[in-house]
Amino acid sequence: MKKQHISVKKAYDFWAEQYESDGNSMMALEDSVFNKEFTSSLNDKKILDLGCGTGRHTSKFIELNAKVTGVDFSTNMLKKAKENNRSKNVRFIQHDISKRLPFKNKYFDIVSCSLVLEHIKKLDEAFSEMKRVCKQDGYIFITEMHPDMRLKGKQASFCDSKGKRYYPKSYPHKLDDFKYHIKASQLKIAKLKAYRGTKALAKQTERAVQYIGYPMLLEFKLIPVET
């Protein structure tokens, strides 16, 4: 059956209503990785949540006493994010993150970008912008679908209420692509870790059974290089 491809914005506008209850195994794994990274108080640090979606990570940042800016270009995702996060310490901005970000240089302590880069064609521009808005003593936290998932024919997708599956526009970036553009953007890889599907994950969401032992997710921690 031919895959039904649609634009990223249209896809996530459709997906917003069921995004948090989708039973998505990739998001379940990514949540566990994210929660291990952010455990202690952020003490009013300025956080940029790029591609914030419904604000699932925004909520965690707020709990850890951060000042959060969530950015997404899906109208419906942002609507959900605002409903889920009414703190005075958060603001949401509708913006296409494949374009130049509307922030000053070296403004944020932490830039977080979760499961977004597969939808970005020009990695060089994405990494350069993340580096530009990150403070010199800050860092960039990124999670992304492992390139090996493409070998299984996988990418971000969702089903509508009638069971029809849709595929947002996606680009098959290789690990070497990430490494090349990270270095070219004057960023240093402080951490790079791959995560495989586990039996524990399969118990959490049955869709993960097919991925037990298979590389599913990449985690990057990037530090700006002094220039």
Image (spheres, rainbow, N blue to C red):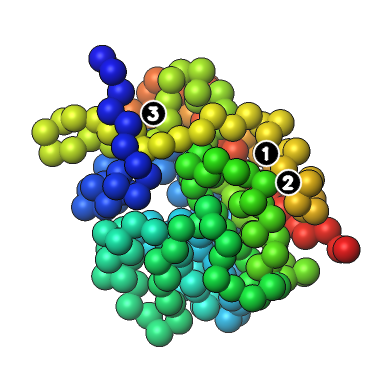
SS for callout 2: helix
Indicate which disc residue 125 carries.
none
In the image, residue 52 lies at what x, y percent? 43, 59
Residue at which label 2 appears: 182
Q: Is residue 82 above or below residue 140?
A: below
* Horizontal relation, residue 14 to residue 155: left or right: left
Amino acid type of disc 1? Phe
Q: Is residue 82 visible?
A: yes
Amino acid type of disc 2? Ile
Between the residue at mark 3 and the residue at mark 2, the CA separation in whole angstroms equals 30 Å
Crowd tier of the residue under label 1, counting other residues whose Cα lies within 10 Å: few below 14, some 14–19, many 20 or above: some
In the image, residue 19 lies at what x, y percent? 28, 48
Indicate which disc residue 208 carries.
3
In the image, residue 164 lies at what x, y percent? 19, 30
- Farthest top residue in view: 1
Instruction: Please say if the residues under marks 2 and 1 sit with CB atoms less than 8 Å apart.
Output: yes
